[in-house]
Image (cartoon, rainbow, N blue to C red):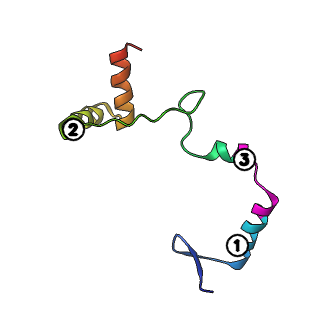
Amino acid sequence: MGKRMIQGREVSDEQVQAWADEAEAGYDVDELQKRWGRPPRAERASQVVPTRFSDAELTELMARADREGLDRSAAIRAAVRAWAHV
């Protein structure tokens, strides 16, 4: 068998065996679920809402976001809050 590589680094037989032993012992699913994805923004996981923007809309959005020091998602949430008066 050839070398085992992960992200360009060789993985030893000992490390593979350690991972196998860990898997065979079982995982705490609740603990694993806590580590997946981004941290929640509220008491529960947020919903992803796909939205389409024209190139012009996205350019305007990003220009204002840059002026206000926001990332795109934060800028969209701020716009929705302002529109919904939340």
Q: Earlier in the sequence, mark 1 or mark 3?
A: 1
Residue at figure coordinates x 35%, y 34% from the top left: 70
Q: Quadrant of the N terminus?
A: bottom right
Horizontal side of residue 65 vs 50, given as left or right: left
- Asked if disc 1 and disc 3 are in contact, CB closer than 8 Å, the reply is no
Q: Secondary structure at mark 1?
A: helix
Residue picked out by circle 3: 29
Instruction: Please provide the residue range marked out in magenta.
Output: 22-31
- Asked if disc 2 and disc 1 are in contact, CB closer than 8 Å, the reply is no
Residue picked out by circle 1: 16
Q: CA distance from mark 2 to mark 3?
A: 41 Å
Residue picked out by circle 2: 54
Residue at figure coordinates x 68%, y 48% from the top left: 32
Q: Is residue 30 magenta?
A: yes
Residue at figure coordinates x 72%, y 47% from the top left: 29
Q: Secondary structure at mark 2?
A: loop
Q: As shown in the figure, which amino acid type bears the numbered disc 2? A: Ser
Q: Is residue 36 magenta?
A: no
Q: Where residue 58 appears, x then y in whole percent?
A: 24, 37
Q: As shown in the figure, which amino acid type bears the numbered disc 1? A: Val
Q: Where residue 19 appears, x then y in whole percent?
A: 72, 66
Mark 1, Cα crowd under 10 Å, few <14 / some 14-19 / many 20+, is few
Q: Where residue 54 appears, x then y in whole percent?
A: 21, 38
Q: Earlier in the sequence, mark 2 or mark 1?
A: 1
Where is residue 57, by image quadrant?
top left
Q: As shown in the figure, which amino acid type bears the numbered disc 3? A: Val
Q: What residue occupies the far bottom of the structure in this picture?
A: 1
Q: Where residue 36 appears, x then y in whole percent?
A: 60, 46
Number of labels in the image equals: 3
Q: Earlier in the sequence, mark 2 or mark 3?
A: 3
Provide the major secondary structure of the magenta segment: helix
Where is residue 45, by image quadrant?
top right
